[in-house]
Image: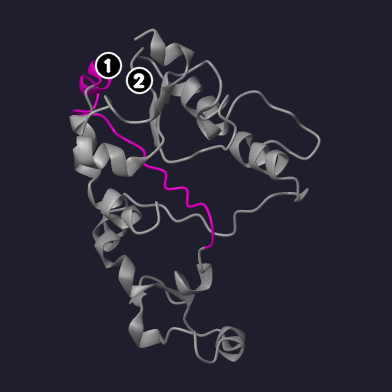
Amino acid sequence: MQASRRKFLQSGPALALLPFPALATRTTGGRVAVLVYLKGGNDGYNTFVPLDNARYRELRPTLAIRREQTLHFSDTHGFNAALKPLLPAWQSRELLLVQGIGQEEVTNQHYRDLEMQYTGASPAEYLAEGWITRALGAARQDSGLGGIAFGDLDIRVSDPMGPFRGERIPALNVVHPSEWLTRRQLTGTQHALNAPARQL
């Protein structure tokens, strides 16, 4: 999304405007999980900043963020100041930070590495369902839309659902979030529905 990523994230409440009846009936009251998956580079050390790590400062003489420039939330780490809008969610325990996620083995084969990320498979496993599908599929009790994904989840047109892949939960993928932000409707935007979602 590049420059529009921030604009999109700030427009979260507008998700309720999606013209999808099966979703509209289930967005009031219950809990909603939001996963932000950033493709490309993210400077993790300057996002989740080690406050008193001498090696961090030694290796980044011009890039290291000083302690007083961070948002303190523990004795050892601080958030980058740009994350200030997220601080209330952190303080109210509605935001979870998972650090040090990686793959067991990188194959350097683009399709296979993405597949492992999207399915949670080990190097020797080949799974047909995404990890979100498995997680939500075990807990869902209704028959409405199970997930909405924004952005290009996979470069293979035949399988655009990424971690939502599989047939257990109805999922919608809006490929270009900027189109939806402009139109506020699915008509005229590039999107995909998996088979269960097409039945709603």
Residue for point 50% across, 21% down: 138
SS for tag 1? helix
Residue 84 in which image quadrant: bottom left
Q: Along the polypeptide, which appears first: circle 1 or circle 2?
A: 1
**Seen from this angle, which residue lies furthest right?**
124
Q: Is the magenta stretch mostly helix, strand or loop?
A: loop
Q: Position of residue 7 (x, y in %)?
A: 26, 54
Q: Mark 2 points at which residue?
A: 145
Q: Which mark is residue 167?
A: none
Q: Where is residue 55 in the image (x, y as percent from the top left)?
A: 62, 86
Q: Position of residue 115 (x, y in %)?
A: 66, 36
What is the three-letter code of the residue carrying label 2?
A: Leu
Examine the structure image and report whether residue 33 is included in the region drawn in magenta.
yes
> What is the total number of numbered labels drawn onto the structure image?
2
Q: Mark 1 points at which residue?
A: 22
180 shown above or below 193: below
160 shown above or below 76: above
Residue for point 37% across, 40% down: 176
Q: Distance between the residues labelled 1 and 2?
A: 6 Å
Which image quarter is the C terminus in?
Answer: top left
150 shown above or below 76: above
Boundaries of the magenta span: 20-41
Q: Does the rendering let one see residue 172?
A: no
Nearer to us in this view, 50 or 177:
177
